[in-house]
């Protein structure tokens, strides 16, 4: 996808829905990831709305993929279950449109590149905008190869979010930070997703490095699974991304998935000293 003929200027800092959702919340804001179609699309809709009512500020709508190289076993199993129901990117966009009718929470499509290329890059941007999606994060698309993607996202007024890793040298970290809109996603550690007993020590240093290059909010993800970790993130970052813990709650509570996710999110918020939100 690298296209040197169509350079993209540094993205301006604008107050998008994703940025506003994070900055209006007491730190840390909560970014909740769900694998769409697990256990089925209808239930995913109820899970998402329940998460929002319980205090999630941003929802990452995960597109199931057969080869999720950055995901740990919990999310891999969720993708397998969703794919057994033939959940597609188109289904995820329809889900976003349904959720948008009920809520103004920020919605981010979280995907690998392959499903988007198969769908069509320009078609994806256009239909995502029509569905009420605010942003996208493509986990395996590097900023160096994202010129055309960023251009089309800008045309459709969608935020581009990239992953920033602890191993990134400063020059690359600067390029990533300046290409982001909405917020920057800081990966707390190397490796795959999954709940961890302790928050990685690299996270605080990474956020400090990112802040040298952007005024955007910074969200920390990979491994955050309990109230203590959630609270710790709020001492140095603007938002915490909770993924595997939510997906695991869904897996372990068949028949009451929305309630289980609501209970987890409420516990995280209360544990960080935040009050129960009003419905949005």
Image (cartoon, rainbow, N blue to C red):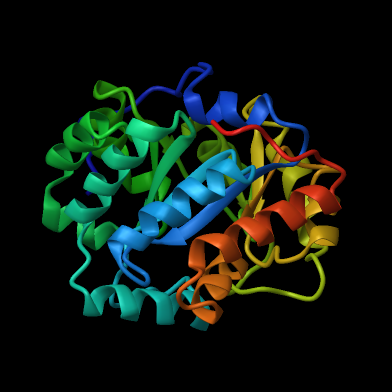
Give percent across and percent down for residue 101. Answer: 33, 32
In the drawing, does residue 200 fall left or right of residue 33? Answer: right
In the drawing, does residue 91 fall left or right of residue 271? Answer: left
Q: How many marks?
A: 0
Q: 177 and 104: which one is in front?
A: 104
Q: Can residue 183 be spotted in the picture?
A: yes
- Picture quadrant where residue 236 is located: top right
Q: 237 and 39: which one is in front?
A: 39
- Which residue sits at x=52%, y=69%? 247
Give percent across and percent down for residue 219. Answer: 64, 44
Give percent across and percent down for residue 21. Answer: 58, 29
- Picture quadrant where residue 19 is located: top right
In the drawing, does residue 221 fall left or right of residue 151? Answer: right
- Which residue sits at x=28%, y=77%? 66
- Picture quadrant where residue 100 is located: top left
In the drawing, does residue 212 fall left or right of residue 185? Answer: right
């Amino acid at each position: 996808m690298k296209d040197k003929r169509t350079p993209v200027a540094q993205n301006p800092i604008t107050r998008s829905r994703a940025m506003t959702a994070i900055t209006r919340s007491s730190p840390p804001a909560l970014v909740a990831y769900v694998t769409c179609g697990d256990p089925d699309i209808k239930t995913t809709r109820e899970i998402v709305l329940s998460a929002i009512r319980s205090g999630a500020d941003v929802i990452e709508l995960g597109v199931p993929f057969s080869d999720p190289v950055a995901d740990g076993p919990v999310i891999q199993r969720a993708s397998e279950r969703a794919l057994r129901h033939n959940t597609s990117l188109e289904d995820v966009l329809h889900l976003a449109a349904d959720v948008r009718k009920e809520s103004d929470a920020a919605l981010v499509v979280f995907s690998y590149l392959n499903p988007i290329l198969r769908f069509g890059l320009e078609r994806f941007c256009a239909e995502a905008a029509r569905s009420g999606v605010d942003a996208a994060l493509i986990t395996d698309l590097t900023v160096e190869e994202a010129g055309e993607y960023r251009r089309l996202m800008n045309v459709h007024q969608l935020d581009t979010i990239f992953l920033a890793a602890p191993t990134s040298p400063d020059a690359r970290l600067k390029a990533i930070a300046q290409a982001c809109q909405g917020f920057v996603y800081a990966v707390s550690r190397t490796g795959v997703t999954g709940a961890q007993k302790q928050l990685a020590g690299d996270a605080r240093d990474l956020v400090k490095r990112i802040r040298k290059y952007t005024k955007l909010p910074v969200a920390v993800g990979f491994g955050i699974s309990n109230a203590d970790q959630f609270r710790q993130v709020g001492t140095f970052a603007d938002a915490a991304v909770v993924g595997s813990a939510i997906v695991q709650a869904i897996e372990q509570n068949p028949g009451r998935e929305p309630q289980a996710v609501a209970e987890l999110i409420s516990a995280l918020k209360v544990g960080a000293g935040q009050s129960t939100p009003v419905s949005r």
